[in-house]
Amino acid sequence: MQLPEAFIKKYSKLLGEEAPAFLQSFDEEATRGFRVNPLKAQTKPLDHSIEDAIPYCPFGYYGSVSGKTLDHQSGLIYSQEPSAMYVGEVAHPQPGDKVLDLCAAPGGKTTHLASYMNQSGLLVSNEINRKRAGILAENVERFGLQNTIVTNESPDTLEKHFPEYFDVVVVDAPCSGEGMFRKDHEAVQYWTPEYPLSCANRQKKILQSALKMLKPGGRLVYSTCTFAPEEDEQNIAWLLQTYSDLWVLPIKKYPGMDDGRPEWADNNPELAKTSRIFPHKMRGEGHFIAQLQKQPSESTVKDLKPQKSNVSKAQKQDWHKVADKLLVNPIEDARLLAFGDYLYAMPGNLPDLTKLQVIRPGVNLGVFKKNRFEPSLPLALSFKPTDFQKPVLITQEQWQNYVHGDTFSVVDVENGWHVLISHELTVGFGKVVNGVVKNFYPKKLRFEIKN
Ligand SMILES: C[S@@+](CC[C@H](N)C(=O)[O-])C[C@H]1O[C@@H](n2cnc3c(N)ncnc32)[C@H](O)[C@@H]1O
């Protein structure tokens, strides 16, 4: 790979005798990986090998993902570069926590964080860019998250809504992306010697907002996919100089992971507790991760006004006509939220969202049509096979017909809506009419698998 001269010079000076191995690593292939979704792990992947485990992530494996597979389409696996998996591991929220993923698209960290939350608590997954927020929402839906809302706000708007609210805040910051040059060759074109510093200034602003939303006693996890000290140790040094109620928490270092470099910032030895992943030392791309804690305080933070359900009596009736035959356990009416023609199930104890740009206020249950309700794909993907009544089991071949948009036949299945299950995974809904499964797989997602 052709690296800019100034880049070579900068890292030759910083890394000294390690520099040749570091620079050589840019000519090697990027490492690929994926995580298995523990919320759906009642089965093993069909089309992806789980032989080559990533040592620091219990659901992580080396290997690339094929998108047109049952594993991927059902949300059983999520493609993620291996080093990036260490961020979710360090953040490791607990079930019931309130978690903010502030720079979240396309959703690698969000889906990882949710893997530890067991559908409980609240995960606010925010993305500033509207288009990317849409992609994030699709990935959250495929992964089947019940406790996650997707917002499309700038950090400084969001901070006004969630003062000192979150137990864990993850800032996976927009950065100069030096660690991703192998994955995205074009990223090299954007690099200039000044670029890291301009990224660092933007990151400081994001961090200021993040800290306003962090509870006393809460943890902030900051990560970048760049080697630039300006965006890594120097930003953490700036945080420690600026906020006296903040300290660095140690991170467990697996073989190949480096300590942060105090000498690349203000020599504060605390910076060695942060972690660097270099591609010439580990199977992964470049990453930096820091974990900080805000001082606990005696004073309690006041609860936010809850979001109220807004569904009409007629909407409730239409929903129940379908849901009572589909779900084993009903979703409480208090959690139903109408959003245009769509019906959502909010996470429990969701604060009032009315003043926020929300892309997804919870699980998309379906859409109100004239005098009837049509269940949506995310409803199927967000619950386990055992959460549904009278599921219809389909073969992998029938699944291929289904994602292509075809109808197919079934025997001895009563008319009406049924969740479809293939290889122990919920894959969508079909409406059975006299032995024929009418296809409700969303038109925009349909695709053909050529065997
Ligand atoms: C490194 S990416 C996030 C990757 C994501 N966390 C994941 O694991 O899939 C950084 C994100 O920050 C967003 N971003 C850009 N400028 C921002 C800003 N000023 N404030 C907050 N987020 C910003 C970008 O749109 C981008 O989606």
Image (tube, rainbow, N blue to C red):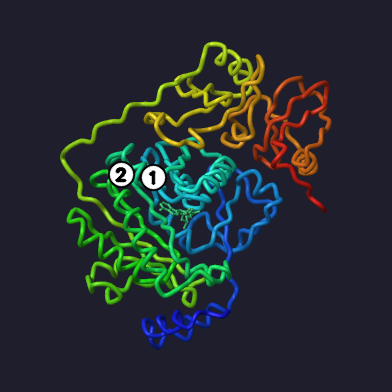
Q: Secondary structure at mark 2?
A: helix
Of the 4 image quadrants, the one containing the N terminus is bottom right
> Is the residue 331 above or below the residue 238 in the image?
above
> Is the residue 343 above or below the residue 211 in the image?
above
Residue 84 in percent (x, y) is at: 48, 60
Q: Is residue 435 left or right of residue 59?
A: right
Q: Is residue 109 left or right of residue 366?
A: left
Q: What's the amino acid at mark 1?
A: Leu
The residue beneath circle 2 is: 213
Q: What's the amino acid at mark 2?
A: Met
The residue beneath circle 1 is: 100
Query: Is residue 284 shown to the viewer in this render?
Result: no
In front here: 30 or 71? Answer: 30
Mark 1 and mark 2 residues within 8 Å of each other at the beta carbon: yes
In front here: 152 or 21? Answer: 152
Within-10-Å neighbours for mark 1: few <14, some 14–19, many 20+:
many
Label 2 beta carbon within 8 A of ligand 1: no
